[in-house]
Amino acid sequence: MDSESKRRNAVLLGGGILGVGFGALLDVIVFHLILQWHHLLSSIYAPSTVAGLRTNVYFDGIFSLAMLGVMSLGGGMIWRALNRSDEAHSTVRLFGSVLVGVGAFNVFDGIVDHYLLHVHDAVHGTRALNPHWVGASFLLLGLGILVLTR
């Protein structure tokens, strides 16, 4: 593999990692904080009590901080690869790799956190929307793959 191919792959990998962090952070902001549907540990600490809600928001914050680190890693990989190359890179492919990362995070969240570990559900107190969450996550992942391969 030549050096330009390695840089191109580094840009796409960085985009995927950036997407994982972005998807997680967007999930926390929209679903955990604004809608208050599924805090990170809501099956362990009931968010229906003040103490449980405080504990969940605390761990949501720690998780958000970690995801900012993941986004920084992905962004740094992209920046480094782009600044070591004279070749133009496809913005569309980069966007596709970010979408793949967002979708991959949500598929992981839906399958591992909702079904395998049972640490939270899409909506507190009901598992009825978990299949919809996973389905929408696979659609997002598929859209990212479609954009990436076009």
Image (cartoon, helix red, strand yellow):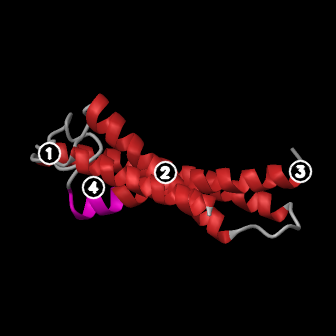
Name the secondary structure under disc 4.
helix
**Looking at the picture, does residue 67 appear above or below residue 90?**
above
For discs 3 and 4, the disc positioned in front in the rendered view: 3
The earlier-in-sequence mark between 3 and 2 is: 3
Dividing the picture into quarters, in which one does residue 34 lie? bottom left
Q: Label 1: which residue?
A: 128
Magenta residue span = 28-36
| Mark sitting earlier along the chain (3/1) | 3
Amino acid under label 2? Met
Q: Which mark is residue 67?
A: 2
x and y percent of residue 146 in the render? 54, 59
Q: CA distance from mark 4 to mark 1?
A: 18 Å
Camera-side residue of 21 and 105: 105
Residue placed under numbered mark 3 in the picture: 3
| Image-based side of 79 in relation to 75, left or right | right
Image coordinates of residue 148 in percent, x first then y, are: 60, 59
* Residue 139 seen in render: yes
